[in-house]
Amino acid sequence: MIRIETGEFNLPLTLESGQVFHWRPHGVGYLGSIGDRPVRIEQRDGALWIEGAEAEWVRHYFALDHPLEEIYATFPADPAMNAALAYCRGIRILRQPAWECLATFITSAMKQVKHIEQMSLAIRERWGKPIGASGLYAYPTPEALAAGTETELRECKLGFRAKNLLGAARAVASGEVDLAAVATMDEEHARAELCKLPGVGEKVANCVLLFAYERLRAFPIDVWIERVLRQIYFKGKRRVTLARMQRFAAEYFGPYGGYAQQYLFHHARRTERRGKRGSDRSVGSVRSV
DNA sequence: ACCCAGGGGCAAG
DNA sequence: CTTGCCCATGGG
């Protein structure tokens, strides 16, 4: 295995924070893929150990160059954010392949992380290219998926999402939407371009901007983050619209809002369900805007 | 049995 | 610009 030095980094938290859905525990580390490379990865002795890909690919994928301390310094210093940071320190926002990220988030609508993983795996096994010798599959290309049928996608348990994923695959395969061009666009145009695809609205577009296009300001608002915003930052306010929360987040969390969002998301998810109201202690009230 | 899940889209107020 | 409803399916 190759040794890679990292700055602050927490591999398990990063892979289990709900931004990527195909890494599975393997020994003391994980087995998965970066693009079409099969990768085994472990974190021990203060370093990363990898097998299957060049160090440079891994550094890029895991964004080991993101200046975490600088990023943390931009976080608002309120109790909720502090609690999330203390819990999530070391999580990095990955640079995922765009299509793979886009496709999996199209299937994520109204689904739990567990089930997104299952659908993603079924899709890989059915249309993906086998890579390595360990039963791993690359995520299928838009062309490969576009050649499939809605019925076949429904067999992967996608339900009503099947039509959306198929439509998106066709639009990308035909060149109607150019994912490489999205990388060159400013944030607003990039978001609008992604939203042309079926099954892609504001939330999914923001996930793709954040997790694949390194737009670290993008702030996806899902049901979890919406709860956090309502309970902590809009406490007592009635009839707060999504658009208003979006504007608040952009201003309040700043240039690395996407990082803040991911930390709040993961912290909320991990501390929920243990006693129902035991987690309210760690977060006080905050100026509500 | 019931409820909700990392939403989107479209019609109707 | 907002609300209501449907879209399938699995897990708690």
Image (spheres, coloured by chain):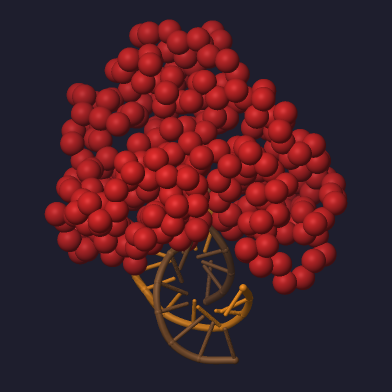
Chain colours: A red, B brown, C orange
Q: Is residue A48 above or below residue A101?
A: above
Side of B11 where A282 appears, left or right:
right
- The quadrant where residue A213 appears: top left
Q: Residue at x 42, y 13 (%)?
A: A49
The image position of residue A158, as x and y in percent, is 32, 59
Tally the numbered discs.
0
Quadrant of the rendering where the N terminus of chain A is positioned: top left
Side of C4 where A107 appears, left or right:
left
Q: Is residue A252 visible?
A: yes
Residue placed most toward the observer, A251 or A26: A251
Q: Residue at x 30, y 31 (%)?
A: A35
Q: Is residue A77 above or below residue A275?
A: above
- The quadrant where residue A263 appears: top right
Residue placed most toward the observer, A87 or A236: A236
Q: Is residue A245 above or below residue A45?
A: below
Q: Residue at x 33, y 29 (%)?
A: A34
Q: Residue at x 47, y 14 (%)?
A: A48
Q: Is residue A263 visible?
A: no
Residue extending farthest left? A147
The image position of residue A111, as x and y in percent, is 45, 57
Q: Is residue A135 above or below residue A126?
A: above
Residue placed most toward the observer, A165 or A126: A165
The image position of residue A143, as x and y in percent, is 18, 48
Side of A137 where A209 appears, left or right:
right
Quadrant of the rendering where the C terminus of chain A is positioned: bottom right
Side of A165 where A238 appears, left or right:
right
The image position of residue A138, as x and y in percent, is 25, 35
